Amino acid sequence: MPAGYRVLVTEASSPAQGIAAGYAFTTTALELGAVSVSGQVDPAAKVRIPLSMMNRHGLVAGATGTGKTKTLQLIAEQLSSNGVPVVMADIKGDLSGLSRAGVGNDKIAERSQQTGDDWQPAAHPVEFVSLGAEGIGVPIRATITSFGPILLSKVLGLNATQESTLGLIFHWADKKALPLLDLKDLRSVIAFLTSDEGKAELKGIGGVSRQTAGVILRALSNLEADGGDTFFGEPEIDPADLIRTAPDGRGIITLFELGTQAARPALFSTFLMWILADLFEFLPEVGDLDKPKLVFIFDESHLLFDDASKAFVDQVVQTVKLIRSKGIGVFFCSQLPTDIPNEVLSQLGARIQHALRAFTPDDQKALRTTVKTYPVSEVYDLEQALTSLGTGEAIVTVLSERGAPTPVAWTVVRAPRSAMEAIGADAVTSAAKAGPLYTKYGTPIDRESAYEILAANTLAPGEPADAPAPTPTPVPTPAPPKPAPEAEEPGLLTEVLTSKPMQSFLRSAASAAGREFSRAIFGTGRRRRR
């Protein structure tokens, strides 16, 4: 036995058994581990999460090195075993071991004895995917139109005025039937609107200053330099490919690896949010189910919310609130609960909190805030417990089958049954190319879109369609409107664009042409439901 532990002889009246009574569910549940009280672990005092409540969302938090990733691995493999597909980010590249059976050792044997687990090694069906063509997995892409102006603004780091301007540009391209499939499409549209030929169109959509357009163009160039051009395009990921089961009925785990997008983690995390919004549109309403249709896991969730606009956070809150009715559960993982906005945190039913470090005043404030998010415990001093947890231990509370919070449990977490080390880049690439998704998404498609349509009107005789940076000419439109009154000089336009009513209008305009609710979520593009 490891130092500091004793296996408790079970007594019906023990505090551990009293806590475990709150986790004695009658329906299928995921096994997290066993209750520990005063350093004594009771292997018979099980801590569990009802499978039917996994669509009530959750949080896994804790300092670096406390066991968060292994907890995510444990949850993912049990979901898969119960026939639930999983989508999760593999930020550090150490979740690829899910595809291989684990190898027993003394530490696993000790942890199994503590938690009453009949540990057996098991591999799980995994699809390895990457953003764009420069990763080691199956290349996954999205079109610019589908990604939408709000999410793209988050990736580009635009302010509220620039975000509103980008929304106007999306709306104009949509109205003119100019498909925005990749970055060169969006660049060509902005270049046209700010050219002499596009002045009339510019006035027709309310005015976009050259300075603002220049900022957006520079941000697009920087994104392209970081490899973002290989992410935007076609074929676009079909959400149905994320909700699949293996022939034996187990759910397929789709691992998104960060790869070359390490320089732009905001793109990676924001892309996952786009996937979630796309799934919302794709899936029908199902209400409460015996098990979720899919569980979505955001690792390093702070990347999603760092420097996020209020519009972005509002849409995340709306998505998390409503996607439960589509049978999807969302789990956020980060170092501190305070990394997650309160409006999102309040929607998360399960809390699995690994150890916190309270070395600074800010850390201590975060610790006190975390304690307030848990039910009152008669067994633990939570402020002390949260700083005393060992690796692979967590303070847990979840929602019972009735939707009520369970008692707070100091939990010694079970060991995953799959391999707990990475399998290596070569093995990931080999597995990705052998899977069915590679045939579908491995080769990019470049069909006619805004770039080609605008460029076609400016080609000299015999000039190829892919000639560099042609200056677009206007799309045929009605006669230009009368000159704007003096009050509509750029300074006033900036004031108008930054006003709350106008921002609300612009976001609505940017999303007006698509499916009403789905485009209200992040302004994402229209998707045909299958």
Image: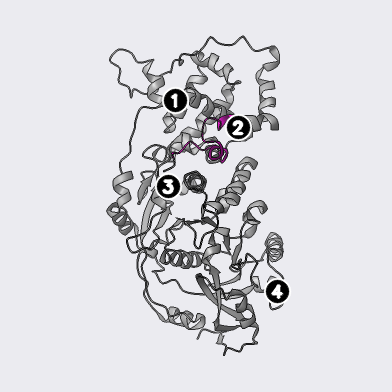
| Relative image position of residue 295 (x, y in whole percent) | 49, 57
Residue position marked by numbered label 3 in the rendering: 239
Magenta stretch, residue numbers: 509-528
- In this rendering, would 407 be left or right of 433? right
| Relative image position of residue 363 (x, y in whole percent) | 67, 62
Rendered-image quadrant of the C terminus: top left
Question: How far is the residue under mark 1 from the one under mark 2?
Answer: 19 Å
Residue position marked by numbered label 1 in the rendering: 178
Question: How far is the residue under mark 3 from the one under mark 4?
Answer: 42 Å
Residue position marked by numbered label 4 in the rendering: 377
Dot 4: element: loop
Residue at image location 33% in from the left, 64% down from the top: 248
Which amino acid does the dot numbered 4 rest on?
Answer: Ser
| 316 is higher (above) or lower (below) than 96 | above
Crowding around mark 3 (Cα neighbors within 10 Å: few <14, some 14 to 19, many 20+) is: some
Q: Are marks 1 and 2 in contact (CB under 8 Å)?
A: no
Question: Of circles 3 and 1, which is in front?
Answer: 3
Q: Are marks 3 and 1 in contact (CB under 8 Å)?
A: no
Say whether disc 3 or disc 1 marks the residue closer to the N-terminus: 1
Magenta stretch, main secondary structure, is: loop
Residue position marked by numbered label 2 in the rendering: 508
- In this rendering, would 470 be left or right of 285? left
- In this rendering, would 529 be left or right of 486? left
